Every structure is written in C-alpha cells, then in structure tokens.
Image (cartoon, rainbow, N blue to C red):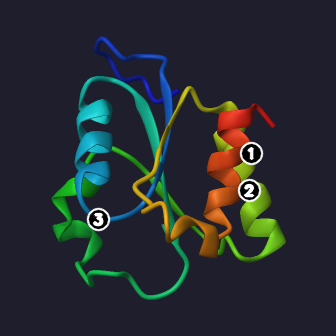
C-alpha cells in the first residue's frame, strides 16, 4: 500500500496502458486513493510523450512488460491475481492477437 487516503483506499487496480478513457479512469481512481499500477508495453510507445509530461500517468507507478514472452505474461497475471479491478481498453477484435487477452480472460474466470 502507498499510504494514500480517500474513498478507494485499499482498492488495488491493474491498468493495461492504452489510449482513450482507460488512462484517465486510472488517474481518477488513483486520485481517489486506489493503489493503481500501470502495465506498459515493452518497446516504443504508441504516442511518444515523455513520462514527465504525460499528465495521465499522474499518481501511479508503471512497469513495462513484454506480454508475448512467458515471463512477462506470468508477471502480469500475478499482478492481476492480486488486483480488485482490472482496467483494459483493448478492442474486441484486437485482444486475440495479444497475450494480454490471456490476462483479461484469466481475471474474468478467476484463474
């Protein structure tokens, strides 16, 4: 836990980094006291914004994982297993191409 206070103190959230409303929602959850960790893709960013200038990263740490490698997927699944909330903004037709869909299926089925 990070020593945050607010109505969501004690709630653990895992966010798969993306574009659109997901990062904004994660920022708001962190502002309300949730303990949010962001999983970034390993490699070049979709939108090359310096970390210090990306306001939507405010209030939460991040980890870069390669979800197509077994060790990266395993680390993501461990984070998801400990989370109360999973935020992901994958389009339904794109999620099958990424191992991240395994993590979302894993979380929705309980393992």
The residue at 62%/48% (across/down) is 104
Instruction: Look at the numbered disc 2 and give the secondary structure of its residue.
Output: helix
Which callout, 2 or 3, points at the residue further toward the start of the chain? 3
- Circle 1 residue: 78
**CB-based contact (under 8 Å), mark 1 and mark 2:** yes
Which callout, 1 or 3, points at the residue further toward the start of the chain? 3
Vertical side of 100 occupied by 27: above or below: above
- For marks 1 and 3, give the CA distance: 23 Å
Q: Residue 50 at x, y = what percent?
A: 25, 78
Say the numbered circle drawn on residue 75: 2
Q: Residue furthest bottom?
A: 44
Say the numbered circle drawn on residue 95: none
Q: Residue 43 at x, y = what percent?
A: 51, 86
**CB-based contact (under 8 Å), mark 2 and mark 3:** no
Q: Is residue 34 left or right of residue 49?
A: right
Q: Nearer the viewer, mark 2 or mark 3?
A: 3
- For marks 1 and 2, give the CA distance: 5 Å
- Circle 3 residue: 19
Vertical side of 26 occupied by 7: above or below: above
Give the quadrant of residue 47. Answer: bottom left
Observer-nearest of 98 and 29: 98
Q: Residue 111 at x, y = what percent?
A: 81, 37
Q: Nearer the viewer, mark 1 or mark 3?
A: 3
Vertical side of 49 occupied by 52: above or below: above
The residue at 27%/84% (across/down) is 48
Q: Residue 13 at x, y = what percent?
A: 48, 35
Instruction: Look at the numbered disc 3 and give the secondary structure of its residue.
Output: loop
Packing grade of label 2 (10 A; few <14, some 14-19, many >=20) is some
Instruction: Look at the numbered disc 1 and give the secondary structure of its residue.
Output: helix
**CB-based contact (under 8 Å), mark 1 and mark 3:** no
- For marks 2 and 3, give the CA distance: 22 Å
């Amino acid at each position: 836990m990070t020593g945050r206070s607010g109505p969501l103190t004690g709630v653990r959230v895992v966010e798969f980094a993306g574009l659109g409303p997901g990062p904004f929602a994660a920022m708001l959850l962190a502002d309300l006291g949730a303990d949010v960790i962001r999983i970034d893709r390993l490699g070049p960013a979709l939108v090359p914004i310096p970390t210090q200038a990306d306001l939507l990263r405010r209030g939460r740490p991040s980890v870069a994982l390669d979800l197509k490698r077994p060790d990266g997927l395993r680390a993501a699944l461990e984070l998801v297993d400990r989370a109360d909330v999973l935020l992901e903004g994958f389009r339904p037709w794109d999620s099958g191409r990424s191992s991240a869909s395994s993590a979302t299926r894993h979380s929705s089925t309980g393992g």
